[in-house]
Amino acid sequence: MTQYYYDPIYGQIVVDEMYYPIVDSYYFKRLRHLRQLGLCYLSFPGGNHTRYEHSLGAFHLATLMEKVIKYGDIKDDDKPRLIALLKLGTLCHDIGHGPFSHMIENALHGEGVKISHEEVGAAIVCHKLKAELKPFEDKYGITSNMISQLMTKSAKDEPLLKCAEELVSSDVDLDRIDYLYRDSHYCGKHAGSVRQQMNFENIWELSDNDGIPRFELTNDGINYAEDILILRKNNYSRIVFESKHMGLTAMFEKAVQLAAEYQDSEFGKRCKIVKETSMEWNDSISVTENFPKIWGSIYGLFDYQAFNLIEECPDRNVRSIIREIRSGDCYPSKCRYGWEDIHYLTKKVILSLKNDKDAYQLRRNIENELSKLKGIESYQIAVHLQKYSVPKPIISGTIKGRLLEEVSGLSRFLIDDVKSQYVVELFLDKSISKSNEDVIKNNFKDMICQGKINKIK
């Protein structure tokens, strides 16, 4: 049956009867218990929205693409199939997220876990939603494996699948459009009325390029894409990299690390299971056998369940951090350095980080080095330092046959502007004495701004 949802961003969202069984499944409904922005609500009280409404929002944007596809320059028989691929891809794209999404996953990867939420989502689609997806196979020839390829960005030979991937996972895609507007709305950083810009017929055209369908930005679409890129820049600087939010995130990561290493705790045991199981994940047979272990241990938990498990760790330091987070008390920020402040030797170390796991390990090493003072423990120090994403071309095509960055000077500027948003920040437990605080701050400054990073290699 067709279901109707009221959304504060778009108004009415319609989920017709073919798609409703997916929305009504346990795996989709659990997204109600996963906050979209982790601990951001402690900095922005309205930022309590979840991956449930975000996924419905991305799905709604996919329905707005129906007219673009309907009047597109591709075979008529392919149009309903492409619409279904796009709607299924947006609906399911976040279904594999674990508790606290990227926050816990980054810490798990730092501890040696090899599986990603995209792979978990692909396993759910292929092994747990077969019945819900069977009507799409019967009507459109869309298999669960095709949807899993959309989620893992591994579409290869199927032209329609590659076309759908452009709007499910790219630099200007429906997922990004929804979460940027939604995050700014709920965090009070209003981006204006999104409804006035939702006529996608003016934004994209669907064309056939030697038998391969492509979504291309129109002239109006180029301006719209620039608006999205500006919104992305603003959201990162005003929300994602807001100081208290980053401090609480760094503290939470410390708690996850300590609890995961405490092998006698329930959370530590579960992390060990996920780590060992993820080593065998690539084998399709082992996915079927090991999914219950991955899901039952960590990935299937709600945010509050994971929070409680971490807090139950016998380590008093873990409990201390979680108590402070629960009350919204962040370690005070003591140093915050932008890219222009960082010494070139330190920049070389940062630029050499290959992935989030490397960045995780560097943060831990810096904290351990700074905690060598008598009476200081590493749990009292939290560092925010991430992998530097070297600016890359924005791979979005336009009707002019060129990339967006080739026809938009603003998009080129925004690529280069990545540097202005990069920050390294030090947070210290307020119980640290003033004399020790000064020493730690000076040592941190030496590492970051004076290039004495060799201390922690």
Image: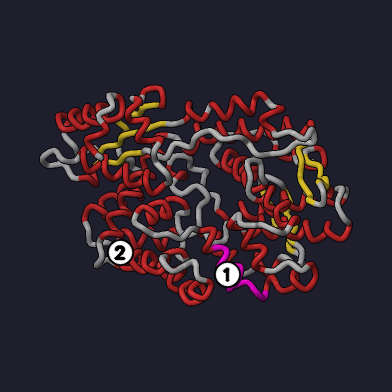
Q: Give the labeled residue for mark 1.
A: 26
How packed is label 1: few (under 14 Cα within 10 Å), some, or many (20 or more)? few
Name the residue located 35 percent from the left edge and 29 percent from the top edge. 336
Q: Is residue 328 above or below residue 402?
A: below
Q: Give the labeled residue for mark 2.
A: 268
**Residue 72's spot in the image, x, y percent?**
86, 48
Highlighted magenta segment, given as a residue range: 121-131
Out of 52 and 203, give the one closest to the viewer: 203
Name the residue located 26 percent from the left edge and 43 percent from the top edge. 365
- Is residue 109 visible in the rendered structure shown here? yes
What secondary structure is marked by label 1? helix
Secondary structure mostly seen in the magenta stretch: helix
What secondary structure is marked by label 2? helix
* Label 1 to label 2: alpha-carbon separation: 26 Å
Label 1 or label 2, whichever comes before in sequence order: 1
Out of 25 and 90, give the one closest to the viewer: 90
Q: Left or right? Give the position of 229 relative to 278.
A: right
Out of 439 and 14, give the one closest to the viewer: 439
- Is residue 1 visible in the rendered structure shown here? no
**Residue 170's spot in the image, x, y percent?**
63, 45
Name the residue located 74 percent from the left edge and 40 percent from the top edge. 195
Q: Nearer the viewer, mark 1 or mark 2?
A: 2
Amino acid at pointer 2: Gly
Quarter of the image where the C terminus is located: top left
Amino acid at pointer 1: Tyr
**Residue 382's spot in the image, x, y percent?**
30, 41
